[in-house]
Image (tube, rainbow, N blue to C red):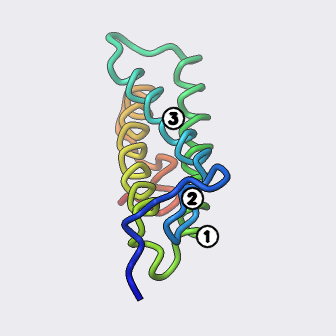
């Protein structure tokens, strides 16, 4: 048969290409990444309120993206466009959030959320 995994179609709020990743998962990840990047661009010390908001958004988005990746992107589906995009967004969000956690702590990020989940060494 012909390979169709290069064609993604929107079906009921999902990007369909074999791996069915909800558009809501992408939206949550993009929102957390943007909030973390915005915090990282600010000058001076971020407020505890801003740090708390970013931390909550990052942790929630990470859980959603991780769960979706583990459930929706198994076996051959990991090579589908939506799964590749999700993996890239997960990495970008992780980097932005880790930097924001570092700025908020004002110290090395030993034992960050990402490290506790075994994703960073």
Query: Residue 55 location in percent, x, y?
Result: 55, 34
Residue 7 appears left or right of 53: left
Query: Residue 74 location in percent, x, y?
Result: 52, 77
Query: Residue 7 location in percent, x, y?
Result: 41, 63
Please state which of the two labelled residues, at mark 2 or mark 3, is closer to the viewer.
Answer: 2
Please state which of the two labelled residues, at mark 2 or mark 1, is closer to the viewer.
Answer: 2
- Residue 79's place in the image compared with 117, above or below, is below
Mark before the other along the chain sequence, 2 or 1? 2
Q: Quadrant of residue 81?
A: bottom left
Q: Which residue is painted at 61% across and 34% down in the image?
A: 56
Q: How many circles with numbers are drawn on the protein?
A: 3
Name the secondary structure under disc 1: helix
- Crowding at dot 2, Cα within 10 Å, few <14 / some 14-19 / many 20+, comes out as many
Q: Which mark is residue 32?
A: 3
Q: Quadrant of the N terminus?
A: bottom left
- Crowding at dot 1, Cα within 10 Å, few <14 / some 14-19 / many 20+, comes out as few
Mark before the other along the chain sequence, 2 or 3? 2
The residue singled out by tag 1 in the image is: 71
Name the secondary structure under disc 3: helix
Q: Which mark is residue 50?
A: none
- Residue 85's place in the image compared with 54, above or below, is below
Q: Nearer the viewer, residue 23 or 66?
A: 23
The residue singled out by tag 2 in the image is: 21
Q: Which residue is painted at 36% across and 45% down in the image?
A: 92
């Amino acid at each position: 048969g012909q390979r169709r995994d290069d064609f993604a179609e929107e079906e009921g709020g999902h990007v369909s290409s074999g791996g069915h990743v909800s558009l809501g998962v992408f939206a949550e990840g993009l929102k957390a990444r943007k909030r973390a990047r915005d915090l990282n661009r600010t000058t001076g010390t971020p407020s505890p309120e801003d740090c708390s908001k970013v931390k909550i958004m990052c942790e929630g988005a990470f859980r959603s993206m991780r769960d979706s990746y583990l459930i929706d992107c198994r076996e051959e589906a990991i090579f589908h466009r939506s799964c590749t995009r999700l993996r890239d967004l997960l990495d970008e969000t992780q980097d932005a959030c880790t930097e924001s956690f570092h700025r908020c702590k004002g110290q090395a990020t030993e034992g960050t959320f990402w490290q506790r989940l075994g994703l960073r060494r």
